[in-house]
Image (spheres, rainbow, N blue to C red):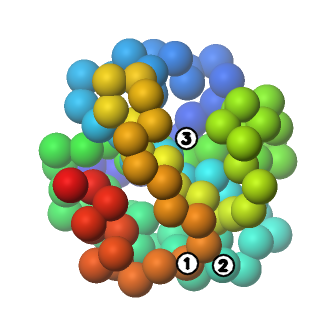
Amino acid sequence: MSVFSINKNNFKEMVLHAEKPVLVDFWAGWCGPCKMLSPVVEQLAQEHPEISVGKINVDEEPELAQRYQIMGIPALLLFRDGEVAATSVGVKPKSALESLLK
């Protein structure tokens, strides 16, 4: 599956009411570690069809970043049934992120 963009207009539908778990990547264009993590997030989206993967640009969606108390990026939040089930902040190896999905 491909990674989709999330904003305040589609957040409820794409994340909170999603039928399957959603991994949300909070990022920004100026963030070097975000750029390092992005290919790993893309790989997870391709290799794990049982989850959806979306990205939220914190500069464009500050309300969503504030709602989920994003203090550092990149930040990954895994949502299950509309609730945050797991979090990861900073660049982590792919294996660590895969364990987050379980």
Quarter assignment of residue 65: top right
Seen from the viewer's position, the closer of residues 42 and 51 is: 51
Q: Can you identify the residue that label 3 sits on?
A: 5
Report how far apart the C-alphas of labels 3 and 2 lie in the structure: 19 Å
In the image, taking residue 72 as reference, residue 53 lies left or right, namely left
Q: Can you identify the residue that label 2 sits on?
A: 33
Question: Are the residues tagged 1 and 2 within 8 Å (C-beta)?
Answer: yes
In the image, taking residue 23 as reference, residue 29 lies left or right, namely right
Going by the numbered disc 1, the residue's amino acid type is Val
Residue 51 location (% of width, % of height): 25, 44
Disc 2: CA contacts within 10 A as few (<14), some (14-19) or many (>=20): some
Seen from the viewer's position, the closer of residues 76 and 85 is: 85
In the image, taking residue 14 as reference, residue 61 lies left or right, namely right
Q: Which of marks 1 and 2 is nearer the N terminus?
A: 2
Quarter assignment of residue 71: bottom right
Q: In the image, what residue occupies the spot 57% across and 35% down?
A: 6
- Residue 46 visible within the image: yes
Q: In the image, what residue occupies the spot 67% across and 23% down?
A: 8
Going by the numbered disc 3, the residue's amino acid type is Ser
Mark 1 vs mark 2, foreground winner is 1
Q: Can you identify the residue that label 1 sits on?
A: 91
Q: In the image, what residue occupies the spot 72% across and 80% down?
A: 32
Q: Earlier in the sequence, mark 3 or mark 1?
A: 3
Report how far apart the C-alphas of labels 1 and 2 lie in the structure: 6 Å
Going by the numbered disc 2, the residue's amino acid type is Pro
Residue 66 location (% of width, % of height): 78, 37
For the C terminus, the quadrant is bottom left
Q: Which type of secondary structure does the marked residue at label 2 adopt?
A: helix
Q: In the image, what residue occupies the spot 81% across and 69% down?
A: 30
